[in-house]
Amino acid sequence: MPIHKPTSGDAAEVFVVDVLSEVTSAMQVPVVPATNPVTYLTINYEPGRNGDIVEALARLDFASLGSLKYPLIAVVMPIPERNSLGFLEVTFPRIYSLI
């Protein structure tokens, strides 16, 4: 789902789900209470339709301790888009953040 309409000078389309994936993969949450040295958790990012997200989280229930379900950011798809003054306006129906 493109964030903007590509022009002839653009090398590639940019997709909202990819941008959110990059942002969440760069985020880290410190474990509380703090350890020495500080331990960080990565954010679990789940984009998709409601059923897809529920299935992915159910699979994590039986995963090893290294694959924690939380902290979580889940983005419900599809993301509605509308052209607005040369930019593509996107509306997120629901974004869940569970820490």
Image (spheres, rainbow, N blue to C red):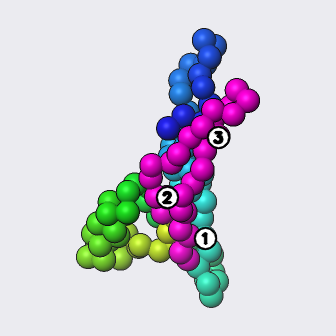
Q: Give how far across and how far down residue 58 sits, in percent.
A: 29, 72
- Region rendered in magenta: 74-99
Q: Nearer the viewer, mark 3 or mark 1?
A: 3
Q: Residue at x 56, y 19 (%)?
A: 11
What is the distance, in whole Å, between disc 2 and disc 1 at their CAs? 19 Å
Tell whether label 3 touches label 2 (CB within 8 Å): no
- Looking at marks 2 and 3 on the same chain, the residue that comes earlier in the sequence is marked by 2
Amino acid type shown at disc 2: Val
Q: Is residue 5 above or below residue 30?
A: above
- Looking at marks 3 and 1 on the same chain, the residue that comes earlier in the sequence is marked by 1
Residue found at the very far right of the displayed protein? 85
* Residue 56 visible from this viewpoint: no
What is the distance, in whole Å, between disc 3 and disc 1 at their CAs? 30 Å
Q: Is residue 20 above or below residue 12?
A: below
Q: Secondary structure at mark 2?
A: strand
Instruction: Work out whether residue 53 or residue 81 is closer to the camera in this orientation and state it.
Output: 81
Q: Residue at x 37, y 63 (%)?
A: 50
Look at the image and say whether residue 88 sits in the magenta stretch: yes
Would you call the spot at circle 2 few (<14 residues within 10 Å), some (14-19), or many (20 or more)? many
Q: Is residue 46 above or below residue 64?
A: above
Q: Which residue is mark 3?
A: 89
Q: Give how far across and how far down residue 48 sits, in percent.
A: 40, 54
What is the distance, in whole Å, between disc 2 and disc 3 at their CAs? 17 Å
30 vs 58, left or right, is: right
Using the image, tell me which numbered label, if any, was put on residue 29: 1
Q: Give how far across and how far down residue 70 sits, in percent.
A: 47, 74
Q: Secondary structure at mark 3?
A: strand
